[in-house]
Image: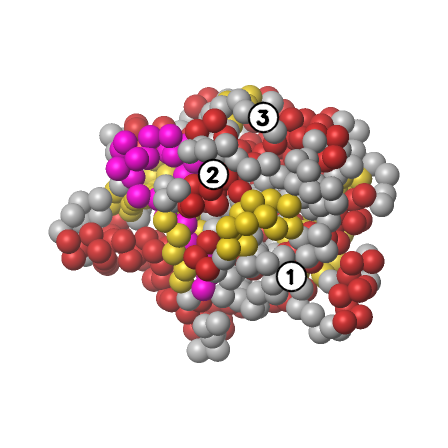
Amino acid sequence: MKKIVLDENEMPKSWYNVIPDLPEPLPPPLHPVTKEPVKPEDLEPIFPKALIEQEMSGERWIRIPEEVREVYRIWRPTPLIRAERLEKALKTPARIYFKYEGVSPPGSHKPNTAVAQAYYNAKEGVERLTTETGAGQWGSALCFACKLFDLKCTVYMVKVSYMQKPYRRVLMETWGGEVIPSPSERTEVGRKILEKDPENPGSLGIAISEAIEDAVKHENTKYSLGSVLNHVLMHQTIIGLEAKKQLESIGEKPDVIVGCVGGGSNFAGLCYPFIRTAQKDGIKIIAVEPKACPTLTRGEYRYDYGDTAGLTPLLKMFTLGHTFIPPPIHAGGLRYHGDAPTLCLLVKHGLIEARAVGQISTFEAGVMFARYEGIVPAPETNHAIRVVIDEAIKAREEGEEKVILFNFSGHGLLDLQAYDDYLSGKLQDT
């Protein structure tokens, strides 16, 4: 295992905004009632002004506040690691590198935006944030960030994940968060859904609806989103900006870049800084999603709500429909009916390839990675590893030396029930 580490002084000072480099203008979000393009003031009930400005910005570079960089220094820059033992096991001529985001306190890439969002909200006098979470990585990251900036945090956690992953709840509560299984009796949206289906397992769309309703009905409260919107993806680009520096320091350039996709934040964080020159450099970029929730590979490209109740603006994206309830696979962070509009536009233009993989094959890949590299991946990360292994085998069969880069978006040490299900033969493909 070979690590490439940056000095903290080499940490990027700006986030990268992909908007100026898209192949066509991004279709604007539409107001859920009027269906007219959203204006900045329409978003003020749920977001602070600074984040609204970032969401609508056309600037390529957005400065990272020094207060945010100071918190980032707790775990950043993160290491770039060459998976030499995995390469040897696969007998591949490919060189495999992964950006290890599991070193953050919550164990995933999510604090890169959680810290930024908590900072901007606190600066504008917000006292409490509400949010949704699937597998719990985003919820734990926001609870961690809120504690640092003295904010309260309420998390609506998809009910099936709340039951599957009790230690994620414990982690959120350790950082002072309030965790509610969704759908819940706490909101009008939740009560209506439970009235129709008391056994509803929940979805990210439902949890988003509950979190937004909670935010707009209470003073000094805003809503915080862990993926999909452009300001969220932009905060994550510190991952790819660091990775570029690390690869350049050893004279390497990626031929293939891989990331798992739920809403698009960790994928964009690694891949977007390479987008501007990807075609010229001959880089293949692959977005991997679950077959159980195949948004990019089987969804329709159209306007749809980001939540189940239709409270959010309509976004132009690949979607399975905002009322879609995905099967209860363990990769809770990838169970979302839509995807980031910027990512969807890039897929539409063929600049990013989308693939869907089955649950069992992803755990097969994750266990192989753990046995050779020692780190247990999150179920979401296993999706990227599955395709990395497939690409490495392809390189072996074709006798090609390639550099494969992927985002190790989070560790799986709080997801061991999923591994137990796999190892005991209980895991099913959906």
Decide: is 409 above or below 358: above
Secondary structure, mark 1, is loop
- Residue 4 visible to an observer of this rendering: yes
Q: Position of residue 396 (x, y in %)?
A: 17, 55
Foreground mark, 1 or 2, reads 1
Residue indicated by mark 2? 269
Circle 3: residue type = Ser
Q: Amino acid at mark 2?
A: Gly
Side of 196 where 19 appears, left or right: left
- Tell me, yes or no, whether the two marked residues, 2 and 3, touch with CB atoms within 8 Å: no
Residue under the point 80% across and 49% down: 214
Q: Is residue 70 above or below residue 288?
A: above
Q: Measured from the top left, where is residue 320 in percent x and y?
A: 55, 59
Region in magenta? 268-291
Which label's residue is closer to the chain start, 2 or 3?
A: 3
Mark whose residue sits in front, 2 or 3: 3
The residue tagged 1 is 323
Percent from the top left, x then y, of residue 277?
Answer: 33, 30
Label 2 residue SS: helix
How far apart are the alpha carbons under marks 1 and 3? Answer: 30 Å
Counting residues from the N terminus, which is met first, the one under dot 1 or under dot 3? Answer: 3
* Dot 2 crowding, Cα within 10 Å, few <14, some 14–19, many 20+: many
Which residue corresponds to mark 3? 57
User: Quick check: is 178 in the magenta stretch?
Assistant: no
**Amino acid under label 1?**
Thr
Give left or right: position of 404 versus 287.
left
Instruction: Please give the name of the residue rendered at 46% of the width and 33% of the height, measured from the top-left corner.
Output: 24
Decide: few, some or many residues near mark 1? Use Cα within 10 Å; few <14, some 14-19, many ≥20. some
Left or right: residue 158 versus residue 375 is right
